[in-house]
Image (cartoon, coloured by chain):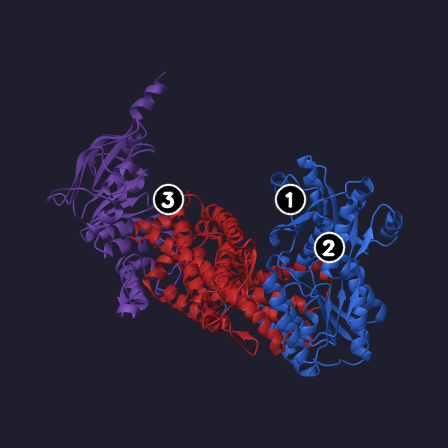
Chain colours: A purple, B blue, C red
């Protein structure tokens, strides 16, 4: 495999006496999906906040394309190609697909005072990208996102990120609130995007979903890296047991 | 077109109601081409005056209503909103004129706004009778008469009562600043005080506060605290009068208080001695006679000449008994209950 | 945390399941899409109340030129305030201080032109500066303190109305000042033709501009996004703070314009001028289809909302019903208008 497109080296984050992340390193490669697993409170959210510019690390460095960088804000991170898709706040249900798609980077026509948003172009872009991702049902860019299913909404958010040049796509628990069919839609989206050469960081606490799309896995527990392994090296049950602190639990039950 | 035949029918029904309503509206307009002028045998009189939330006006309204009932008048009372008095005065007058009644009775509270509209009404051939407020403008506006009382006379009557109680320094509380009638009352009080060798000062209350007893009590109390020489207070409506009594009690000050307008509370305060006198503007007469004279003028061209005084009448311990019996027998005539 | 299912998201924004078409994947017909536009409900409310008063009071002058001018003028003055307020509410914020800015403006203009006999334009210029400062204060304080704008603007409402009364008493010893409008200003703001005020032209012009900005510019997209979910918008790169502050300023300036119009029309300055807009402004905006939670609505909707309120508040004067109950009637009619609005939406959606 080639050089990592993004890397966190020995990153730690302390808040007022609480250690959220302790000396964690990870590497992301283009076309590969790394699944970040762990229970609530394991430090996954904090770690990705550091990678996406929402928080600054107390120690350690962030490298993009081999260069150490300082990500001052989410906008900064996005400008450098690190995009995040969140669980439920990724899209605005009361706005159309087209408007959601181009939010923050609206295409314009005309100049000066007559500079206006090109809604037709926005809709066209949105539908084209959705079709490319395999979402065939949506044909009208003017449709409100609120009428889309959960999986389709994630498609809008993901398609948007990819279209605007994301090279690293961070997905924060994308299937956590979805049913089986919707989860399948999202997981196949991840596969499609991965095949396009984007590096994926997929955060989840669902070991089964992770096993379906992950090339490599990283399990965190209490802010530390508990285990790191590649696809096929562990079974789903072993992964779940590691996440839940299997050794400790069996220790309890042994009494 | 619709996924559900039932919902399509319902929607169609809904839209039909709207369309039919609009069609009926058009028919109504076409059918009543004589929407103006003398509408046949039943005279139509529009009465624009104060809101029923202000304790002064319910007796006025009841008087007008009674006259309409007794004389068989088609009567519409349009209350002005005191919280937004300029705009409301304009809107209510405009609505009154648009109805093209046989006569228009109006309380001219905000003269810069209402005077031009009175003139407009007269130009359109609507006779206007000015009622309760507008003592100085009605003639210039072209109204056929005025009924109510003169501010200075009312203020002087109040002054005489306070002077009888030995007051040398008086306070006049004005709850609708900008209303010339109420301002004139305070001026009348000042004149009477000055003539007796004393003085008086006016406290204007913000109009929006005037129907909030808590605010009024606070405003008066604050004034009493900062003006220790005040011995007597004249208030201009029943609610404010009661609030002044409360304020004086809270400030622990011995003050002689009199107020315009009667109410259950002020009457009982007069009984118990907390209030020294009441000035009865007799708003019931403003309403009843206002309607009566508008009616006789519209129908026969007859009305009293000039200004008709419906007050001030003084109520104190000497005639309280008669007042009490009327209040008991005819609620709503002498003041809000 | 809110789940990503479409039903829960709709609930989170204050809509019920009955307000949205089912996810059949089929394109909605043109008629349906028209009926589901945000302003259609406001239009229906206006049509329903107009029909009612036309039928019941049409013979009594409601439909005459003067009667129509009466409610149209009232709607236009309310509309000047409701329009920018509507945009601010689409962006998810409230401004209660409009109730005092109108009055404070009238004091400024009346003192300048009446008490000091200066040209009214000076008072108008001062009021504009005042409006901008109030808007900036409202916006920046809301952003810095992270308090709900409802609370922040409630305090500015009280501060401004108290301050205006204080300044008025200090300079002129009165809270009600006559303005002597001379020169060109009254013509620009207060002239009328056959009973119809020039404020109507101001209003419609601004509505056109606001619609253009909302529907056709990036800034408009940002307004909707900021109201839909400020966090999402921010993460997408939308300058939500700039959007909000601009809209607070616009709302204050709307109140200033209404204040200038009314002061020059009534030739009178009073602190309490426009105090009602706090309630009637929000009512007009909500009747017009803007969601209280933000993120949805249109500028034209506020027009229909203002018209609905104008018709109801003036129409009652033509009914000749018991005067004790005037306020009650206004409330009942507004409720009926909103109910008709919702009913239509449900039927259009096909769930009724």
Chain of the residue that carries numbered disc 2 in the rendered image? B
Q: Secondary structure at mark 1?
A: helix
Residue B56 quadrant:
bottom right
Query: Which subunit holds the residue at mark 1?
Result: B
Q: Which of the two discs, 1 and 3, sits closer to the camera?
A: 1
B109 relative to C271 in the view: left or right: right
Crowd around label 1: few <14 · some 14–19 · many ≥20 (10 Å): many
**Secondary structure of the residue carrying numbered label 2:** helix
Q: Nearer the viewer, residue C199 or C307?
A: C199
Q: In whole angstroms, how far apart are the C-alphas of marks 1 and 3?
A: 39 Å
Disc 3, SS:
helix
Real-space CA distance between mark 2 and mark 3, rounded to the nearest whole angstrom: 54 Å
Chain letter of mark 3 equals C
Q: Which mark is residue A129?
A: none
Residue C82 in picture, x, y percent from top left:
49, 61
How dense is the environment of label 3, judged by Cα within 10 Å: few (below 14), some, or many (20 and up)? few
- Residue at 64% x, 46% y is B216
Of the pair C262 and B15, the residue shown nearer to us: C262
Q: Say which residue appears at 50% left-offset and 73% top-offset.
A: C198
* N-terminal-most mark, 1 or 2: 2
> In front: mark 2 or mark 3?
2
> To which residue does mark 3 refer?
C144
Residue on which the image places disc 1: B220
C263 horizontally vs A81: left or right:
right
Residue B155's disc is: 2
Could you tell me which quadrant the N terminus of chain C lies in? top left
């Amino acid at each position: 495999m080639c050089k990592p497109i993004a890397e966190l080296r020995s990153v730690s984050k302390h808040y007022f006496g609480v250690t959220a992340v302790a000396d964690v390193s990870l590497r992301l490669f283009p076309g590969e999906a790394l699944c970040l697993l762990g229970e609530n409170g394991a430090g996954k959210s904090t770690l990705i906040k550091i990678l996406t510019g929402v928080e600054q690390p107390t120690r350690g460095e962030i490298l993009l394309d081999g260069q150490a960088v300082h990500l001052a804000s989410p906008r900064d991170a996005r400008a450098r190609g690190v995009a995040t898709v969140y669980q439920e706040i990724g899209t605005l249900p009361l706005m159309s697909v087209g408007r959601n798609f181009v939010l923050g980077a609206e295409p314009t026509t005309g100049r000066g005072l007559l500079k206006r948003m090109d809604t037709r172009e926005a809709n066209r872009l949105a539908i084209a990208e959705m079709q490319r991702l395999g979402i065939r049902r949506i044909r009208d860019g003017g449709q409100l996102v609120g009428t889309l299913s959960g999986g389709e909404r994630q498609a809008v958010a993901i398609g948007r990120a990819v279209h605007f040049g994301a090279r690293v796509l961070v997905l924060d628990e994308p299937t956590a609130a979805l049913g089986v069919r919707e989860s399948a839609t999202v997981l196949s989206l991840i596969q499609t995007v991965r095949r396009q050469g984007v590096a994926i960081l997929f955060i989840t606490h669902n070991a089964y979903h992770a096993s379906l799309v992950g090339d490599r896995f990283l399990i965190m527990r209490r802010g530390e890296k508990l285990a790191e392994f590649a696809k096929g090296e562990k079974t789903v049950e072993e992964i779940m047991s590691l996440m839940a602190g299997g050794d400790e639990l069996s220790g309890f039950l042994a009494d | 077109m619709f996924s559900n035949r039932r919902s399509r029918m319902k929607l169609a029904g809904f839209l039909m109601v709207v369309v039919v309503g609009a069609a009926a509206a058009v028919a109504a307009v076409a059918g009543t081409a004589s929407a103006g002028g003398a509408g046949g045998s039943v005279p139509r009189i529009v009465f624009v005056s104060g809101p029923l939330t202000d304790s002064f006006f319910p007796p006025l309204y009841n008087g007008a209503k009674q006259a309409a009932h007794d004389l068989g008048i088609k009567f519409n009372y349009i209350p002005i909103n005191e919280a937004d008095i300029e705009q409301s005065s304009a809107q209510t007058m405009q609505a009154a004129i648009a109805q093209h009644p046989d006569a228009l009775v109006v309380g001219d509270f905000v003269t810069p706004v209402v005077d031009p509209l009175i003139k407009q009404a007269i130009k359109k051939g609507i006779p206007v009778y000015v009622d309760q407020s507008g003592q100085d403008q009605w003639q210039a506006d072209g109204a056929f008469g005025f009924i109510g009382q003169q501010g200075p006379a009312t203020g002087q009557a109040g002054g005489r009562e306070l002077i009888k109680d030995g007051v040398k320094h008086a306070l006049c509380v004005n709850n609708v600043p900008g209303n010339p009638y109420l301002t004139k009352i305070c001026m009348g009080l000042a004149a009477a005080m000055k003539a007796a060798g004393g003085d008086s000062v006016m406290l204007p209350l913000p109009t929006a506060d005037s129907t909030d007893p808590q605010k009024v009590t606070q405003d008066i109390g604050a004034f009493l605290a900062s003006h220790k020489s005040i011995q007597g207070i004249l208030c201009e409506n029943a609610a404010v009068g009661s609030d002044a009594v409360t304020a004086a009690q809270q400030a622990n000050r011995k003050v002689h208080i009199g107020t315009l307008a009667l109410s259950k509370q002020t009457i009982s305060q007069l009984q118990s001695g907390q209030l020294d006198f009441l000035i009865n503007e007799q708003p019931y007469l403003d309403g009843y006679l206002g309607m009566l004279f508008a009616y006789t003028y519209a129908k026969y061209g007859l009305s009293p000449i000039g200004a008709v005084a419906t007050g001030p009448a003084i109520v104190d311990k000497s005639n309280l008994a008669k007042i009490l019996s009327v209040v008991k027998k005819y609620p709503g005539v002498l003041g809000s209950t | 945390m809110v789940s990503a299912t479409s039903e829960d998201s709709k609930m989170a924004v204050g809509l019920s399941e009955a307000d949205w078409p089912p996810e059949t994947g089929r394109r909605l017909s043109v008629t349906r899409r028209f009926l589901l536009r945000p302003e259609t409900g406001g239009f229906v409310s206006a049509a329903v109340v107009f029909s009612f008063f036309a039928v019941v009071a049409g013979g009594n002058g409601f439909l005459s030129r003067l009667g129509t001018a009466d409610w149209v003028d009232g709607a236009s003055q309310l509309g000047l305030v409701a329009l920018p307020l509507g945009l601010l509410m689409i962006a998810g914020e409230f401004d209660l201080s409009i109730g005092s800015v109108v009055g404070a403006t009238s004091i400024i203009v009346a003192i300048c032109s009446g008490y000091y006999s200066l040209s009214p334009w000076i008072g108008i210029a001062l009021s504009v500066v005042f409006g901008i400062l109030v808007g900036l204060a409202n916006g920046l304080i809301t952003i810095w303190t992270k308090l709900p704008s409802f609370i922040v603007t409630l305090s500015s409402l009280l501060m401004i109305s108290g301050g205006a009364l204080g300044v008025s008493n200090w300079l002129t010893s009165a809270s009600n000042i006559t303005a002597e409008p001379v020169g060109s200003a009254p013509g620009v703001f207060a002239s009328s033709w056959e009973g119809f005020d020039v404020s109507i032209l101001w209003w419609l012009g601004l509505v056109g501009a606001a619609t253009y900005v909302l529907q056709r510019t990036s800034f408009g997209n940002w307004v909707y996004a900021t109201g839909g979910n400020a966090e999402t918008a921010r993460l997408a790169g939308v300058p939500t703070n700039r959007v909000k502050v601009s809209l607070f300023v616009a709302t204050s300036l709307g109140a200033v314009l209404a204040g200038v119009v009314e002061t020059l029309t009534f030739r009178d300055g009073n602190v309490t001028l426009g105090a009602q807009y706090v309630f009637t402004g929000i009512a007009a905006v909500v009747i017009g289809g803007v969601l209280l939670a933000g993120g949805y609505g249109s500028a034209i909707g506020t027009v229909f909302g203002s018209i609905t309120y104008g018709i109801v508040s003036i129409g009652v004067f033509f009914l000749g019903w018991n005067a004790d109950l005037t306020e009650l009637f206004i409330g009942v009619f507004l409720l009926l208008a909103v109910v008709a609005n919702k009913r239509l939406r449900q039927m259009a959606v096909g769930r009724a």
